Image (tube, helix red, strand yellow):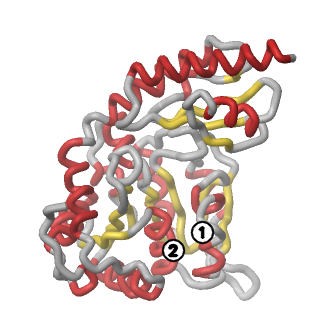
Amino acid sequence: MEAEVGDEQMGEDPSVNALCERVADMLGKESAVFLPSGCMANELAIKVLCRPGDDVVCERSSHIVHYEAGAPAALSGVTLMTIDGDRGRYSVEQARAVMRKASFASPGTRMICCEQTTNIGGGALWELDDLRALTELAHAHAAFAHLDGARLMNAVVAQDVAPSEFAYGFDSAWIDFSKGLGAPVGSVLAGSRDFIDEAWFYKKQWGGAMRQAGILAAACSFALDHHVDRLADDHANARRLAEGLAELPGLLIDPSLVDTNLVFFELAEGDANAFAAALQSHGVRVSVVGPRRLRAVTHLDISVDDIDAAVAAFEQVIFSTSDSE
């Protein structure tokens, strides 16, 4: 609240400027822009780097496919060329198979997109070598590479790899601050200076300029100072939750697939919405992502005691349901 502020869209907010410079350096890029959301970061990258009709290669469960309100088509007119991958990831061979050169009858591939970590893929981690190979493939086909970094810092902590190493070779990359890092608002998109200059144009056009945004940027800087290393606690809590759920009847989960802070599980039978509502009546909130599939997320407000209380709530719901039947 005491952050020094100025007019962000005039380049006069020192707290915003400091954050952008810091993130650009972290990601090994020339410049960066502060944004209200990660959704806007993805959409700005697509808008700047692609043209209407272009193909964007991504995994079928990607955030840009399911959770951005159709923005790739609505805002940029691109086609999403989706790949059936492994937990949100895909191989170089799979990408090569769907990439195409523009012709009089077909659009060309203009971008490949990777999520690190994956969302609906369950927080799965891309290996650094695989990301490098995909960026090289994109550039060999005169295409761009974009890194959706909604949970990039989770990967940094889990794999002990610097952010700049993950972002190397990507033409655009971003970090989200309102997820595991715990800030209330904000993402920072980074790339070349020319890329960011053009991104600023569309940020303004889409209503994303934020004036005295330093109080938000300061919270993001605080998160970088204090909340990165502790992401390991979230990962440990997620594994603890997964192991606890694996011992309960009626839940299908493999704890070995919990790489970071996302825990996905399925009901052997029953309705996910009803199960989630019953859990919430016990003070535990989970997301419904399928008829029987649900998602739990650990974060800085969740303690070990909370995990144990959540497992107890799951047990109560499961046995109260079976008793009523």
**Residue at (31%, 72%) from the top-left corner?**
33
Task: Please state the total of marks drawn on the protein image.
Answer: 2
Instruction: Tell me residue 73's x, y (percent).
Output: 65, 76
Q: Is residue 314 above or below residue 35?
A: above
Viewer can see residue 198: yes
> Which numbered dot is residue 142?
none
Instruction: Tell me residue 134's x, y (percent).
Output: 49, 56
Amino acid type shown at disc 2? Ile
Q: Is residue 83 left or right of residue 68?
A: right
Quadrant in the picture for the C terminus: top right
Q: Is residue 72 above or below residue 132?
A: below
Q: Quadrant of residue 199?
A: bottom left
Contact? badges 2 and 1 (CB < 8 Å)? yes
Question: In the current view of this chain or complex, which residue is farthest to the front?
Answer: 281
> Which numbered dot is residue 56?
1
**Residue at (47%, 43%) from the top-left corner?**
126
Residue closer to the observer: 4 or 117:
4
Q: Is residue 12 above or below residue 112?
A: below
Residue closer to the observer: 205 or 62:
205
**Residue at (19%, 61%) from the top-left corner?**
1
Amino acid type shown at disc 1? Val
Residue closer to the observer: 202 or 245:
245
Secondary structure under badge 1?
A: strand
Q: Is residue 214 left or right of residue 82?
A: left
Question: Would you name the residue on which mark 2 appears?
Answer: 46
Viewer can see residue 139: no
Instruction: Tell me residue 222's x, y (percent).
Output: 20, 51
